[in-house]
Structure formats: C-alpha cells, structure tokens
Amino acid sequence: MRIGEAVVMGSEGLDALLTTLIELGYETRGPVVRDGAIMPGPVREVADLPVGTHDVQAPGRYGLEQSDDDTVFAWAVGPGSWKAEFFPPSQELWHSTVDGESVTTTTPDLDMPPLAIVGARPCELAALAVLDRVLLDGAFPDPRYAARRDGTFLVTAECGSPAATCFCTSMGTGPGADSGFDLALTELNDDDGHRFVVRIGSDRGAEVLAAVPVSEVTAADLAARDRVLSSSGDLIDRRLETRGLADLLARNLEHPRWDEVADRCLACGNCTLVCPTCFCSDVSDTTDLTGDVHRQRTWASCFDLDHSHLHGGPVRSSTSSRYRQWLTHKLSTWWDQFDTSGCVGCGRCIAWCPVGIDLTEEAAAIRETDGAVRSLSTAPGRAR
Ligand code: SF4
Ligand code: SF4
C-alpha cells in the first residue's frame, strides 16, 4: 500500500487499527462522550468511541442525542479540542525545593510515549497546523509543545454530519481532508453495510495499515464517499466571506458594531478557551508552606481585563476593545503574524458562547456597513 491509495475496512478493522497503534507503543486518544459532550479521551477499542451518538448545535447551544445505530463519527466537534493534548490548560514549567541552604530546581520530564489521535476532524487537523505555525515554526519554539507533538500519528474522520455552527467550507478546512493526516477515514453506513473508506496519507500510515484487515475499495465505495462529503458540504450553510476580510477589519477599528456586540458580550472568555488555535497563556509562581516554588503556565484569554495590563493598567479596558482584539486577531492580524487565518471554521466559539454571539455574523455586519465610524464620545465607563 502506498500514499494516496484507498482501501475499505469494517468496524473490526477500526478495532484492529487501535490495537496495532497500542502495540506499536502509541498512547491512543480519540473522541469520547464525557460530561454530556464529545471530548478528547483515551480510546482502546471502538466501544470507547461515541457509537450511535449525535449532536445538536446552534449559537449558544450544544446537546447530545443517543440512537441505536452503529455509526461512530456522526457528530461534529465538541468543546474540547486537540490543542489541550499538546498545550495543556495548566502545565508546570518547573518547581524548586528547598532543603536547608540548598535549592534544587526540577523541570518536568518531557519524554512521553508518542500520541495517536483517532477521529480528529479535518478542521482540527487544520487547527493543529495553525498551532504548529505559532508554537513550533517561530523563532522561539515551545519545547513542551514540540516534545508532545513529535511523532503524532493522526487519523482523521471526515465529516458526514456537520453541525449548524460549522463553516469549514468557507475556510477551506473541511468537510474532507486533503493533507495533514497519516490515515483518513470516511464512514459509510448504507445498503452495502457499515464500513470505512481509508485513504493513506503517509508512509507511516501505510505501515500501520498493513497490520489491519482491509479489502479493496470499489468504485461504489468511492462514489458513496463522494456523496457523503458532497451532502455534508450542502448541509453547511453558515458562511464567512473571507475575500478582503483582513483589510476590511483593519480599516474598521472604529466601527459602531464593536460597541453593539459589547452590549451582549459577557467577556467570559469561553470563545477563546474552546478555540483550537487560541494560544495565549499566563505564567505564575506559587510558594507552598514548605517553601517549594511552582511555576505554572495556564491558558489565558484576551477577554481577561488583566491580559492587557501594562504599566498603570489595562490598555483594553472596555469589552468592545477586547472583543475587537479577539476578532481582528483571529481574522486579520493573524495573517500578519503567521501568514494564515487564526480561524478554521470549527464553530466552537459560536456554540459555546453563552449569549450566542456568532463571529460570522459580526464580520458580515461590518462588511455590510464598511467605513461606518462610531462616535468617539463614548459613555462614561465605556473606555475604548
Ligand atoms: S463573545 Fe461570547 S464567549 Fe466570547 S467572551 Fe463574549 S460572551 Fe463570552
Ligand atoms: S474562532 Fe471560533 S470558529 Fe474559528 S477556529 Fe476558533 S473556535 Fe473555531
């Protein structure tokens, strides 16, 4: 088997794939149902995956439904992204212990088994590529991210059941995957049975697949795969017009829409925490009663007042300035920094915003009234 080839496997093949990865020493992770959501978790067999689970998503809304069908990947992304595997929400950078006059500083061991992710969505592969740009490819690569990311085996599950919040078609990141995977699965469940078309994306993928029971792909299988992806694309009706978007936002920093969205925005930061590409963090030191010091890195959000604290106070004291910072970074200045969009169209920030703010709607509103300028005499307490 070679890169670019496709084969077919049944659910027992998916079980064999997981077993093979475990035997090769991978720590296998995939989507699991946890706390009423699809979340990343340990998977060792198909039964650990969300079999028969479907999701319902809308702005400010997320829920799961269970059916008795045997589909494994009939849902869209949940709140937990793969970012947390490589860039954990909280991570010790070092700790020091005091023993009499001597102080010993220890950094955590970065040597971990390689990770295999089975069931990442195409938009999530795109999000990892964006994070790689930020945390690996820059002048100062993050050693913790690099150690965890090194050798990751990626099995993507192309999307047959997009959510109402998805807009990957606008961002060119789904519902199918073109690259960035070792193996790509498309789940088919039709009159010809429950099976997966498997496409090989790397030599490593071909080697792993050699230990899995597969059969030759037929023209009917490939046509069925095309139908799944095309019907997914048709189901995605949320759009983000990306033509000239970076410049549009850059020239509308004084648009009245920033104040309008701030009237609804709670500045809770949910949108940044669920986003698979947001990478801001904070570093803090704590000392326990024994005198040991722990330096911890934790996720931060540009919606936190402290996040823009410079000498004398925060430079983004209003909610409108913080929302503007978030949206213009994602869709405009990310291009200047990393030569890519900071958004992959996964829709998490729309579903998990408690008041249902939708960035596609906000960008469209600014486009419709391009050039509008808000009054600079803002109300008291509404500092810009
Ligand atoms: S846009 Fe929504 S999720 Fe983001 S900070 Fe505002 S209220 Fe929270
Ligand atoms: S900004 Fe929203 S839609 Fe875009 S990648 Fe982040 S969470 Fe997904």
Image (cartoon, grey):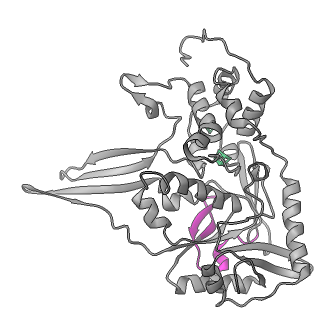
Residue in the image at 70% along x and 52% along y: 346
> Compared to 36, does 252 lie above or below?
above
Residue 197 shown left or right of residue 202 in the figure: right
Q: Is residue 40 left or right of residue 71?
A: left
Q: Is residue 222 above or below residue 74?
A: below
**Front in this rendered view, residue 101 or 34:** 101
Quarter holding ligand 1: top right
Q: Nearer the viewer, residue 195 or 330?
A: 330
What is the quadrant of residue 98 in the picture? bottom left
Tally of numbered tags: 0
Q: Residue at x 48, y 52 (%)?
A: 138
Residue 33 is inside the magenta segment: yes
286 magenta-colored: no
Q: Position of residue 293 (x, y in %)?
A: 24, 51
Query: Which residue extends farthest top?
Result: 377
The quarter of the image holding the C terminus is top right
Q: Which residues are magenta?
A: 30-52
Residue placed most toward the observer, 293 or 111: 111
Q: Position of residue 221 (x, y in %)?
A: 87, 79
Q: Is residue 352 visible?
A: yes
340 or 314: which is nearer to us? 340
Residue 37 visible in this rendered orientation of the protein: no
Q: Position of residue 41 (x, y in %)?
A: 57, 67
Q: Which residue is painted at 78% across and 33% down in the image?
A: 364
